[in-house]
Amino acid sequence: MTLSKNLHNKAAEISKPNDHQGVWALLGPEGGHFLMEYIAKTQGDYVEIGSKWGGSAIMAATAMDMAGRPGTVYCIDQFSAKVISPELEGNKLLVEFWAYVHEWGVQQRIIAFQQVTPPLPYPIQFHKFSVGFIDGGHRFDEPIHDFILLEKRITDYIIFDNTEKEEVMNAVSKALESGWVIDSELEYDCGVPGYGDNTIMALRHE
């Protein structure tokens, strides 16, 4: 079986519904496979803005393991999901994040920062990453601010989730103006009723 097929199967496994009725890995099998392919074919560290329950972080770390390559997964999130579920106030979401990370056995790969962006966390302000994933705030200029935060730190690919949203596409337009080009995109179903179709897009720097 090829690495690509194995990655797809693993993405589907990670995306299976759990106590949160499937909303913890919102990329779904297809979106997760898309992300994992880019991580598997690059070298270097990975950073994501927007982690929630840890689905994408677990996929990223697992892709590194399956590709047999070194690398660290850096996660940046407020880890406060009161708007999603009132029971997840305070640090409860961060506790659940680490519980899932340990469940999948990839804790040695992952470093998480609990903060709002911008700025980047101080320990990684000048760090370089092969892949950056932007899936944080989707309102107003939040996606643009996240792109500006990462654009000088990424060596290979920047991946935007939810490019079906106007605010995220505004950030993509900013990236195109800055010399990035669209490498590929995918429309996928995250599997959560009411969310509709989502689009994930990878950009590379020319």
Image (cartoon, rainbow, N blue to C red):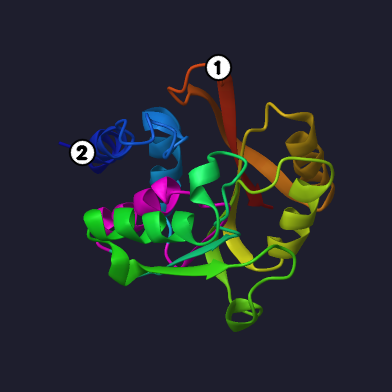
Secondary structure beneath dot 1 equals: loop
Q: Residue furthest front?
A: 87
In depth, the one of 115 and 159 nearer the eye is: 115
Q: Is residue 129 left or right of residue 182?
A: left
**Which residues, given as a range, are shown in magenta?**
43-68
The relative height of residue 8 versus residue 135 in the rendered view (above or below) is above
Amino acid type, callout 2: Thr
Residue extending farthest left = 1
* Residue marked by disc 1: 194
Q: Is residue 96 left or right of residue 170?
A: left
Element class at badge 2: loop
The quarter of the image holding the N terminus is top left
Left or right: 19 as drawn, with respect to 103: right
Asked if residue 15 lies left or right of residue 153, the reply is: left
Q: Which residue: 38% across, 54% down? A: 96
Residue 51 part of the magenta-drawn span: yes
Figure check: 195 above or below 123: above
* Residue hosting label 2: 2
Image position, residue 115 (x, y; %): 63, 67
Q: Amino acid at mark 1?
A: Gly
User: Quick one: label 2 or label 1, which is nearer the N terminus?
Assistant: 2
